[in-house]
Amino acid sequence: MNLLIDIGNTRIKLGYATATGARNPEQTLALTPAELPLVLPWLQQQNLNPSRALIVSVAALEVEQQVSHLLESLHCPARWIHSSHACPLVYNGYDQPDQLGADRWLALIGVLAQHQSTQTPIIHASFGTATTVDTVLPKKTTQAHDKALFSGGLILPGPQLMSDSLALNTAKLGQGLGQLQDFPSNTRAAISTGIASAQAGAVLRQWQLAQALGLGAPRLVCSGGGWELVQLEMEKAYARQQHQLHLALQPIYQQPTPVLDGLAYMATQY
């Protein structure tokens, strides 16, 4: 059994997968570095005895060492996955592949593993501490060893980071969420609507650029803890965009743990 570990900027997520890459997204543990001792009772509760761990990290060295010590206590060997590791599903088109965030790379692999039959571009928007909006082109359009192509993407502050920045750097706005409105008539609504609209606008920009390539209507996949803050605006804006282009209405696909899904796929390759 493979223990899957995603060490993020604010939280650590754990899951597990069989040798064939099968996993249950609902059986996921999310905690802070200070809560790492909770991993042992979680493993016992799940009746798990991992034979190895696959790890991706964007966190500080201190947090990575904490995870390493935990795995040593379990006598569980670890394999750390980086963006320079090749994947049969997708080619890394970053100018310098090793500078792509490892979590972005594994998330793209996880999305493609769930949407392998898709013959159109895929836009993956992850709303975390930072929001990333990445585009994958179908393999029929590339010469990259018969793989899909990660062609690049955006990075911007995530929804909560935008909110915190306003609260910290303005004197009287304060914190708190407001109702999303077309024409906000109070400060809380103005802030929440502004943040959600900025996030949705960034996603639609990349969707429109991919749509203009003439490869079919892109599939939109969203993930991340900030999704609930932008979901309503994103769904409305996406539906409006498709209606304006006279396209058949396609849903937004939500994928709760794409990084862990990517690790599960990579477990089948080693």
Image: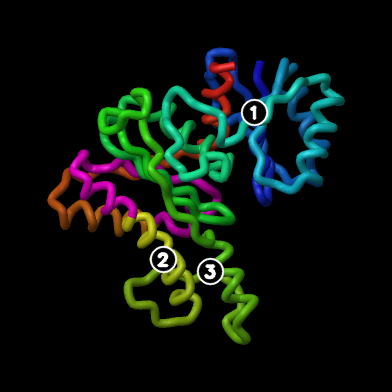
Question: For this view, does 127 lie left or right of residue 71?
Answer: left
Residue furthest toward the front? 95
Question: For this view, does 243 lie left or right of residue 43?
Answer: left
**Residue lying at 26% horizontally and 36% vertically, measured from the top left:** 120
Q: Does the residue at mark 2 contact the one at mark 3 (Cβ under 8 Å)?
A: no
Provide residue 46's location: percent of width, then percent of height.
Answer: 70, 22
What residue does disc 3 label? 177
Front tag of 1 and 3: 1
What residue does disc 1 label? 4
Residue type marked 1: Leu
Label 3: element kind: loop
Provide residue 5's location: percent of width, then percent of height.
Answer: 66, 33
Q: Is residue 120 above or below residue 164?
A: above
Indicate whether residue 224 is drawn in magenta. yes
**Residue lying at 16% horizontally and 47% vertically, measured from the top left:** 247
Indicate whether residue 114 is drawn in magenta. no
Give the quarter of the figure containing the C terminus.
Answer: top right
Write down the region rendered in magenta.
206-231
* Pick the front one: 26 or 132: 132
Q: Which mark is residue 215?
A: none
State how far apart marks 1 and 3 are (Cα): 34 Å
Which label's residue is closer to the chain start, 2 or 3? 3
Provide residue 202's location: percent of width, then percent of height.
Answer: 38, 59
